Image (tube, rainbow, N blue to C red):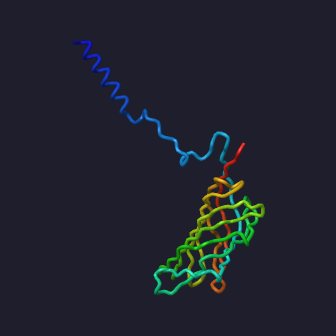
Amino acid sequence: MMKRIIFLLIGILILNVACQDEFVEPEISQANFTATKSEKLKTFHVKGQVDAIPNYDLPLIICTPVEYEVVLSSGGWVSGHENIFGKFVQEESLFTRDLCELSMTPEGPVVYSHASVELTKSNGDKIFVESYSWVNATNGDMTGYNVLTGGTGRFKGAFGQADMLNASVDLETGIASWDEDGYMTLVLKD
C-alpha cells in the first residue's frame, strides 16, 4: 500500500513539474532572431539633409476630409545625403504618398501624410523607409520622423529611425526640406 502511495506521489510530482511554464523554452523563430552567429549588429548615429520634391505629373492624392479640397502629389523624388548612406541618386530615390489627412488645430490646419520611400545609392544599394509627417498648411512648418525598414546590399536587414529637424515645406513649390538625426542598425557579416 505504501509503495502505491509513493508511486502516486512521484507521478503527481512529475505531472506538476511538466505542467509548469518556467521549464518550457520559448520557440525561436526567424522573426525574433535577427542575426545569426556569423552576423553582428552595429548601431550608428545618422545625420543628414533631405529634400522631398513632388512630381506633379503623377496623380494627386486628395486629403480627407475632402470638403477642405487639399491635394498633394502622390509621389516624387528624394535628394540629399546621410553620413552612413552617402548621397542619394535623385532619379532613383522615390517616395509614394498613400495617406493624407487634414485636421484643424489651435495652430491652424495641419496635414498629416504617410509615404513609402526607396533611397538609392550610386552603387545600387537601397534603403526602404516609412515616412510620417505633419505640415502646418498656413506657414509650412513641418514635424515628423522616418522609420528605416530594411534595404539591399550593405543595408540588408538594417533598421532604425530618424527625426525630421528644422523641417519645412515651401508652400509654393511643395518641396519639403529637413535635417535628419537618428540611428541606423546594420547587420555586419564576419
Task: Give left or right: position of 174 versus 62.
Answer: right
Q: Please report the residue visible at 66 percent of the width from the left and 58 percent of the height from the top.
A: 151
Q: Note whether 23 is above or below 167 in the view shown.
A: above
- Residue 172 location, x and y as percent? 65, 86
Residue 178 location, quadrant: bottom right
On the image, the x and y values in percent for residue 112 come to 53, 75
Q: Which of 137 and 22 is in front in this view?
A: 22
Q: Report the number of discs.
A: 0
Where residue 186 sits: x, y (%)?
67, 52
Residue 21 position by quadrant: top left
In which image quadrant can residue 122 be found? bottom right
Where is residue 134 drawn, in percent x and y?
Answer: 55, 74
Tell me what residue is drawn at x 37 percent, y 30 percent: 18
Image point 60% across, 75% down: which residue? 142
Q: Quadrant of the N terminus?
A: top left
- Quarter of the picture containing the C terminus is top right
User: Can I make out residue 105 in this image?
Assistant: no
